[in-house]
Image: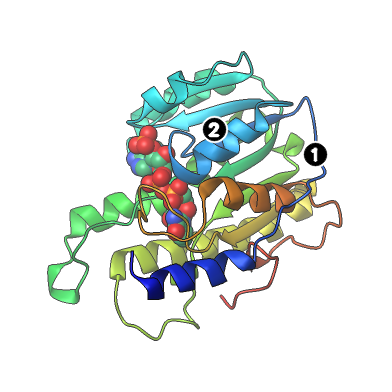
Amino acid sequence: MGLRTIFKKTLYNLKYTKKRNNSVSGKYFLITGASSGIGLSLTKNLLNKNKVIGVYNSNKSNLDLIRSNNLIKVKCNLSDYSDFENLNKTISNKKIDTIINCAGIFGSNNQSLENIEFENLLNTFKINSVSIIKILQVMEKKNLIKFLSKIINLSSDGGSIQLNNQGNAYIYRLTKSALNSISKNLSVDLFKRYKTEVITIDPGNVKTNMNPKGFLSADKCSEYILNIAFDKKNKLNGKFINLQKKEIPW
Ligand SMILES: NC(=O)c1ccc[n+]([C@@H]2O[C@H](COP(=O)([O-])OP(=O)(O)OC[C@H]3O[C@@H](n4cnc5c(N)ncnc54)[C@H](OP(=O)(O)O)[C@@H]3O)[C@@H](O)[C@H]2O)c1
């Protein structure tokens, strides 16, 4: 890593101090993308005091290393609708308090206009954008949405239409913009019906499989996400925010 990058990384991390979180205990959390990166860190953090239904696709081994009776692992490829039956069976009648929707992929390495592959685009759309709707449909059939106090969708500032001044990454940007649209819509709909808060977060520049050169550790990022998840002021419903709770334009 060059000096310039070290300097930038240090500056970036200065914004993130130790977060003291209020916490909750004895609740059910459903975490998608629980097998890697930010979702894995959130899962480990929450298991001390809560139960986690951890959704994975291909990386079960990371979850197998966790020794906790509070972890329930469920294999669900979010782009394969027959797999949702696994989720259906696992959820059973569990009163899930919070969903943290972390699952996501970048799409492909080459997303220039002439290289977009439509199968790939649609597959990414299923995972990044509409999987939260499918999960909620599974819960609604069991009349469980009324117990949900929060949904946190991990989006990206790449999904902000207003901030886009680069004209690249078509697949990632469009699927995150769609997630933002769904998230905002849910925040109106579910808050009206059940007082469920729906919050959209850009986690920043985080070192994970998706972003190996990221500046912030997944553990630090998850501290900040939990600070938002445990926020009791109830002022974040319908907002698109960064880890410091600063609003990002849609
Ligand atoms: N890292 C960053 O800098 C950054 C920046 C902005 C936004 N984000 C967003 O943050 C979220 C978490 O990403 P991350 O950085 O933690 O990346 P990551 O380490 O690559 O984790 C991605 C997770 O998504 C899951 N996933 C992928 N395809 C799936 C599928 N078909 N079905 C079910 N699960 C699937 C993976 O499961 P398996 O491993 O089991 O396949 C994995 O647990 C993503 O939505 C990402 O877009 C990240």
| Element marked by disc 2 | helix
Q: Is residue 23 left or right of residue 246?
A: right
Q: Which is closer to the viewer, label 1 or label 2?
A: 1
Q: Which residue is mark 1?
A: 23
Kindly give the residue lying farthest to the bottom in the view shown. Answer: 165
Question: Where does residue 11 sit, x and y in percent of width and height?
Answer: 55, 72
Q: Residues within 10 Å of mark 1 (few under 14, many from 20)?
A: few
Kindly give the residue lying farthest to the top in the view shown. Answer: 69
| Element marked by disc 1 | loop
Q: Residue drawn 47% across and 61% down?
A: 215
Q: Is residue 170 left or right of residue 116?
A: right
Kindly give the residue lying farthest to the left in the view shown. Answer: 114
Is 116 drawn above or below residue 128 in the view shown?
below
Q: Quadrant of residue 244?
A: bottom right
Q: Earlier in the sequence, mark 1 or mark 2?
A: 1
Picture quarter with the N terminus: bottom left
Q: Hey, what amino acid is under mark 1? A: Ser
Q: Which residue is mark 2?
A: 138
Is 208 drawn above or below residue 7 in the view shown?
above
Picture quarter with the C terminus: bottom right
Q: Quadrant of residue 202?
A: bottom right
Q: Residue drawn 22% across and 54% down?
A: 120
In this view, the residue in front, 233 or 43, is 43
Residue 210 shows up from this direction: yes
Kindly give the residue lying farthest to the front in the view shown. Answer: 3
